[in-house]
Image (spheres, rainbow, N blue to C red):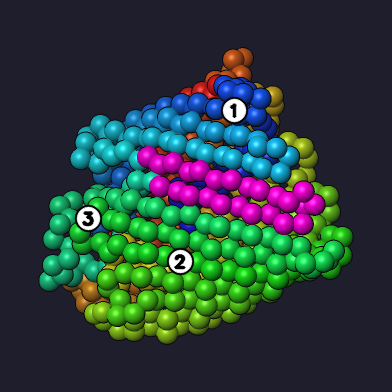
């Protein structure tokens, strides 16, 4: 799970649980609301080159940047059993000293949720199109003879990509206690840089669940994932089988835990093939000690690949967060995450082949202040990230601070 995904899950989901967003939006009809949003911030980083060492050189470089975000959210109720939602956004980062890093991100999401009158079945459909920019390059090799890295003029070059995709979800109650859930996801990733590899990802899952007790839902789930790109002789695939439960421990504590087995098969066009398997887990826990406090933790593991050849890896991620509504005006957030990436292929460096394994620690603090004008918020953020690598001079740490304002009608 990358940094942007962590922040999205933390502030969107957690924030909505604690307090409603200010403003009621612009109504166009009895059941349709449009919510415009603006967020502006000034930020400073003491190292903008994280995870981006060029051939044998340590990553370093401080800079400040201005970030802007403009978004429009749609909420439409088409009756008791039909919802339509959407969101479009455009954001931009402008750096003071490294203007070559200035880049926009933009995208649109549109979806619908339809439930039967009886509530025994639910259908969700969602589509997504976006242009995204990663904070750093995805390295495959730093060997001087590696021609695939020639286009990288600086250690801070970013990975830019266009993504198109969506998912379909269907949940059907078979009986009073038994049900089945089906999900299919599709993502087409087109990288801007030629040395990165475009790919198509497809995800299938089937879950059979049983309401064992009023507070426990147990389930069996199987997942099948396919990756298609030009660096493979054949499609890479992952098969997983898990058993788990969702448990309402108390009215204030919820737990979702699943464990199982995963098999990963990948046949590279150049280089070695991989046939890996191992233990798989997925965990989500939430605790509401008071109406103003949320404590949550989550974790999972699995196999994935990045933008470049040789980036296939087994990854494990853990996240913990605390969100506190300190007063009517103040909200505080503290988050910590840990990511372990074990690369399947050895990495070529000027020092020779290295069995690469990276560990990343990330800490974030955020303070939100709602002004007397409830539609306007001020915020402060501070973060620290520490990444360790087996590659000489490729470990790093970075500290960032930022102040900003957000407005939502």
The quadrant in which residue 101 appears is top left
Q: Which mark is residue 256?
A: none
From the image, give the main secondary structure of the stretch colored magenta.
strand
| Residue nearest the viewer, comparing 14 with 37 | 37
Q: CA distance from mark 3 to mark 2?
A: 23 Å
| Residue nearest the viewer, comparing 201 with 156 | 201
In terms of secondary structure, where does tag 3 sit?
loop
Pick the quarter of the image with the C terminus.
Answer: top right
Q: Which mark is residue 33?
A: 1
- Numbered disc in front, either 1 or 3: 1
The residue labelled by disc 2 is 202
Q: Is residue 65 left or right of residue 31?
A: left
Instruction: Give the residues in magenta.
Output: 106-129
In terms of secondary structure, where does tag 1 sit?
strand
Task: Report crowding for label 1: few under 14, some 14 to 19, many 20 or more residues within 10 A (C-alpha).
Answer: some
Residue found at x 45% / y 82%: 276
The residue labelled by disc 3 is 193
Would you say residue 276 is visible in this rendering? yes
Residue 338 locus on image (x, y percent): 51, 59
Would you say residue 59 is visible in this rendering? no
């Amino acid at each position: 799970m990358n940094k942007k995904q962590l922040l999205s899950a933390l502030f969107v989901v957690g924030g909505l649980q604690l307090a409603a967003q200010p403003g009621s939006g612009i109504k166009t009809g009895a059941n349709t609301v449009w919510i415009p949003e603006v967020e502006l911030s000034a930020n400073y980083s003491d190292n903008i080159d994280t995870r981006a060492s060029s051939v044998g050189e340590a990553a370093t470089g401080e800079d400040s940047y201005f970030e802007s975000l403009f978004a429009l959210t749609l909420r439409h109720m088409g009756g008791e059993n039909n919802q339509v939602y959407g969101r479009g956004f455009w954001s931009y980062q402008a750096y003071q000293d490294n203007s070559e890093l200035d880049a926009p991100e933009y995208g649109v999401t549109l979806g619908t949720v339809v439930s039967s009158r009886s509530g025994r079945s639910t259908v969700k459909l969602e589509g997504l199109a976006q242009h995204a920019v990663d904070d750093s390059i995805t390295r495959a090799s730093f060997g001087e003879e590696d021609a695939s890295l020639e286009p990288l003029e600086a250690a801070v070059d970013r990975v830019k990509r266009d993504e198109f995709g969506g998912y379909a979800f269907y949940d059907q109650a078979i009986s009073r206690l038994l049900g089945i859930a089906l999900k299919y996801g599709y993502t087409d990733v087109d990288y801007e840089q030629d040395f990165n590899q475009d790919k198509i990802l497809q995800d299938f899952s089937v879950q059979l669940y049983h309401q064992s007790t009023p507070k426990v839902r147990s389930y069996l789930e199987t997942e099948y994932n396919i990756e298609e790109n030009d660096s493979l002789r054949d499609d890479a695939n992952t098969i997983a089988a898990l058993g788990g439960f969702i448990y309402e421990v108390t009215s204030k504590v919820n737990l979702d835990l699943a464990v199982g087995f995963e098999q990963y098969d990948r046949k590279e066009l150049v280089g070695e093939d991989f046939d890996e398997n191992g233990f798989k887990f997925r965990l989500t826990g939430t605790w509401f000690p008071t109406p103003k406090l949320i404590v949550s933790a989550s974790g999972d593991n699995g196999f994935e690949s990045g933008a470049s050849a040789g980036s296939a890896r087994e990854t494990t991620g853990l996240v913990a967060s605390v969100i506190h509504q300190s007063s009517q005006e103040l909200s505080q957030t503290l988050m910590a995450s840990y990511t372990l990436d074990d690369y399947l292929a050895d990495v070529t460096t000027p020092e020779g082949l290295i069995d690469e394994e990276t560990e990343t620690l990330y800490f974030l603090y955020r303070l939100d202040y709602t002004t007397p004008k409830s539609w306007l918020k001020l915020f402060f953020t501070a973060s620290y990230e520490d990444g360790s690598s087996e590659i000489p001079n490729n470990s790093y740490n970075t500290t960032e601070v930022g102040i900003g304002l957000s407005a939502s009608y």
